[in-house]
Amino acid sequence: MKAKLLVALLCYLPWISMAEAANRYIADDVHTYLHAGSSNKYRIIGSINAGEPVVQLDRDAQTEYVQIRDADGRVGWVDGQFMQSNESFRSKLPALETQLEETKLLLSTAGERHEQDILDKSTRLQQQEQELTNVSDQLSELRLQHTQLKTENLRLTSLMDDKEHQMRLDWLLNGGIVAGIGLLFGIFLPMIPLRRKNKNGRWMN
C-alpha cells in the first residue's frame, strides 16, 4: 500500500512543479551564478545575465534560493533576492530598440513629409489665389456691365423725356393752330353777307 502511495506521489510531483512554475526575471543590476543546489555551497554550473527572463520552478524556504530554468533550458538554483516579477529592462530592450528604430524612421521621413505638406499647402494657396483672381475679374466685368446698363438706361430715359416734351409741344402747336383757325373763323364769319330769298323765291344779296 505504501509503495503504491509513493509511486502516485512521485507521478504527481511534476504536475505540482508545473503548477508552481512562473515567469520571473533576474534583477537588472546583478550578474548571478547558477548553482546545482539550493545554496551557494553547491557547485556553480553556470551564470545568469542581469535582466534575463527565467521560469521559477521551486523555492527553498530556508535558504530562500529559487530553482529556475533559463532560456537555454538549463535548470539550477539562484539567490531569491536577485529575482523580480516585473519585466526587466533587458527583456524590454528588443521592443525598445524596435520603437527606437521606428522613431528614427519617422524622424528621417519627417523632413520629407514636412516639405510635402508645405508643397500641398502652397498648391492649395495658389489655387485659392487663382479662384480669387477669377472672382475679382468676374466682379469687375459685372461692374462694367452695370455701368453700361446704367448709361443706356439714362440715355433711354432722356430720349423718352425728349419725345414726351416734343409730343407736348406738338399738342400745343396743333391746339394753337386749331384755336387760331376757330378764332379767325369766328371773326370773319359774321362779316360774310347772307343771301336771302325774296317774295318771288329768288336769292337776294
Image (cartoon, rainbow, N blue to C red):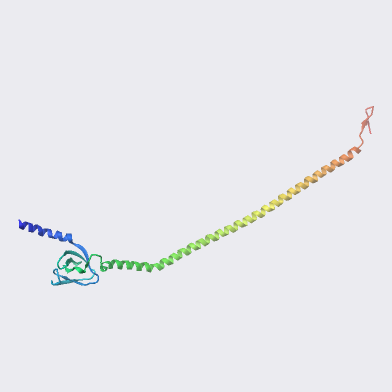
Furthest-front residue in this view: 62
User: At 62% from the left edge and 57% from the top edge, which residue is drawn?
Assistant: 144
Res 33 quadrant in image: bottom left
Image spot of residue 115 (x, y percent): 43, 67
Residue 2's place in the image compared with 38, above or below, is above
- In front of the other: 150 or 39: 39
User: At 73% from the left edge and 48% from the top edge, which residue is drawn?
Assistant: 164
The answer to whether 62 appears left or right of 135 in the picture is left
Image spot of residue 5 (x, y percent): 7, 57
Furthest-top residue in this view: 200
Image spot of residue 13 (x, y percent): 12, 60
User: At 46% from the left edge and 63% from the top edge, which residue is drawn?
Assistant: 121
Image spot of residue 174 (x, y percent): 80, 44
- In front of the other: 17 or 81: 81
Number of marks:
0
Res 101 quadrant in image: bottom left
The answer to whether 46 appears left or right of 195 in the picture is left
User: At 68% from the left edge and 53% from the top edge, which residue is drawn?
Assistant: 154
The answer to whether 193 appears left or right of 78 in the picture is right
- In front of the other: 118 or 40: 40
Of the 4 image quadrants, the one containing the C terminus is top right
Residue 19's place in the image compared with 65, above or below, is above
The answer to whether 116 appears left or right of 190 in the picture is left
Of the 4 image quadrants, the one containing the N terminus is bottom left
- In front of the other: 123 or 114: 114
